Image: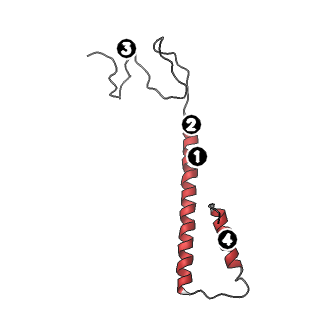
Amino acid sequence: MSEFLSGHLKATRDVLKGHAHGGKTFSADEIVGFVEHLDNLARLAIAMENDLSRYRWNDLARRERPVEPQAAPADNVILFTGVRRERLGPSGGDTGGNNTGGGGAA
């Protein structure tokens, strides 16, 4: 059977479709099995929704994050574009908020 939710749903539909006009009485064991099958389908759907949500969230974050070209702080340093950095203050240290050991008056 397919690993995709659509494949599982189609297979379930095909099984039930066979009983559309002839009637079918389900035993308690068949109902328990069917409910377990529906639980598996729900887990597949949740996993797919989580993957889609994560993809959309990351894509949105990438598009909203401005990447500005910056001059290298020294001749022997190359800054890679797309990497978020704290802005440096006039003394070379960070502008506050981080304990990165940035410069400033002691």
Answer whether labels 3 and 4 touch (C-beta < 8 Å): no
Look at discs 1 and 4 and give the one toward the viewer: 4
| Residue 56 badge | 1
- How many neighbours does mark 2 have within 10 angstroms: few (below 14), some (14-19), or many (20 or more)? few
Answer whether labels 2 and 3 touch (C-beta < 8 Å): no
Mark 4 lies on residue: 11
Q: Position of residue 66 (x, y in %)?
A: 55, 29
Describe residue 104's horizontal placement relative to residue 68 as left or right. Answer: left
Q: CA distance from mark 1 to mark 2?
A: 10 Å
Answer whether labels 1 and 4 touch (C-beta < 8 Å): no
Q: CA distance from mark 3 to mark 1?
A: 39 Å
Mark 1 residue element: helix
Look at discs 3 and 4 and give the one toward the viewer: 4
Instruction: Name which of mark 4 and mark 2 comes first in the sequence.
Output: 4
Q: CA distance from mark 2 to mark 3?
A: 30 Å
Considering every residue shown, the one lying at the far top of the view is 75
Q: Amino acid at mark 3?
A: Ser
Answer whether labels 4 and 2 touch (C-beta < 8 Å): no
Q: Position of residue 85 (x, y in %)?
A: 46, 26
Q: Is residue 51 above or below residue 9?
A: above
Q: CA distance from mark 4 to mark 2?
A: 38 Å
Q: Amino acid at mark 2?
A: Arg
Q: Is residue 55 above or below residue 5?
A: above
Mark 3 lies on residue: 91
Residue under the point 54% across and 54% down: 50
